[in-house]
Image (cartoon, rainbow, N blue to C red):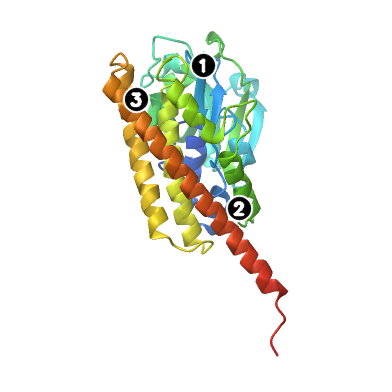
Amino acid sequence: MHSSAQLPVGEPLLDAFNEQATLLALLNGRRNEDQVKSWLISQFVNLYAIEDEFAQEKYIISSTRDFRGGLIEACPFIMQRALPRGVIAQSAVGIVGAVEDCVERGIYLYVMLNKFYIPCAEQYGKMHFNHLTLLYGVDKNEQTIHAADNYRNNKFTFERLSFEAIKNAFDGYEEAANQAELSVFTLEQADAPWSFRKEELIEGLDGYLNPPKQGMIEGLRVYELMEQSLDDLKLLHLGSFHAVYEHKKMMRARYEMLIELGLIQENTEQYSLLQTMEKEADQLRFTYLKYRYANGHAGLRAMIQSKLQLLRTADLTICRWLRDELLDVEAGAQLGNEREPIG
């Protein structure tokens, strides 16, 4: 292969969780493709409070039911294959050689690395912790590999890691307690015929607006949990507020993609509300961070409660409007099909 090669990636729309960010980084360059938009529109519609065994807090909020797996595999535009970790570990070329070979063939590697050995990671030299990492390029001259993961402050970033760091992080897998994923994944871009599935989005909106009262906390019920977390700081992971902000960001992007595909009519009032909601959710995450370090400051508490109420009300308004728009379009199409042909 050439001395350096890098597969395409781009800044992800969402980065609260590794798998979401990885998938969207891979799809970034294809966001103008109508079939990719048609698929993305129906993703990340709901919110879920997930019990996280690896966090100090009880719950973390995510826009997918399981933020640790299944999303990339379910995407029709990425072909994912799994191979035993031992195939690479026992090979003569090791992880570095595997990356070189894969990149040359247009294949990404998605693999668990021990962050204890990654210099740019918060856990570097402090804690053995395995985490899935996207490897998408190599530079033989610089002896570095291009990698993407949530390294600091849970921010998904693109880094260049030395061959030595990658080798140590791969070989040090068994030193960490979390060894749930024993496979290495290869990821390839794929073409797939895909058209917008209106009923899938309507079903997602219904689930968000009318969540079950029992079982997993989801949909609009997460706002109750967010307010409860003001009294119990061990209830909700701080990253939950970032995930809720990204959920609003995705709501705006969904509206824009629906307009671009001609699936709904523009509505300046609803779009303005979407922008307001995104701005309020952005401010909320920083206000909550201040609250955590201000010993329950009453003024900050009132501000958070006000923003939560505003977001919940705006959510109801927008999701009901969008659901009705989709149903109206569907009814109109059915009516048109029932009309007698002219002439």
Rendered position, 284 above or below 76: above
Quarter of the picture holding the C terminus: bottom right
Circle 1 is placed at which residue position? 58
Sooner in the amino-acid sequence: mark 1 or mark 2? 1
At 44% across and 34% down in the image, what residue appears? 244
Element type at marker 2?
loop
Q: Is residue 131 visible?
A: no
Give the class, few, some or many, for how many residues have Cα within 10 Å of label 2's Cα (few <14, many ≥20).
few
Closer to us: 68 or 143? 68
Which is in the foreground here, disc 3 or disc 2?
Answer: 3
Give the class, few, some or many, for how many residues have Cα within 10 Å of label 1's Cα (few <14, many ≥20).
some
At 63% across and 33% down in the image, what residue appears? 212
Closer to us: 206 or 305? 305
Q: Amino acid at mark 1?
A: Lys
State the image quarter where residue 90 is shown.
top right
- Distance CA(mark 1)–CA(mark 3): 17 Å
Residue 173: image location, x then y, percent = 54, 15
Circle 2 is placed at which residue position? 191
State the image quarter where residue 271 is shown.
bottom left
- Distance CA(mark 3)–CA(mark 2): 42 Å
Is 74 positioned to the left or the right of 143 in the image?
A: right
Element type at marker 3?
helix
Circle 3 is placed at which residue position? 288
At 44% across and 20% down in the image, what residue appears? 229
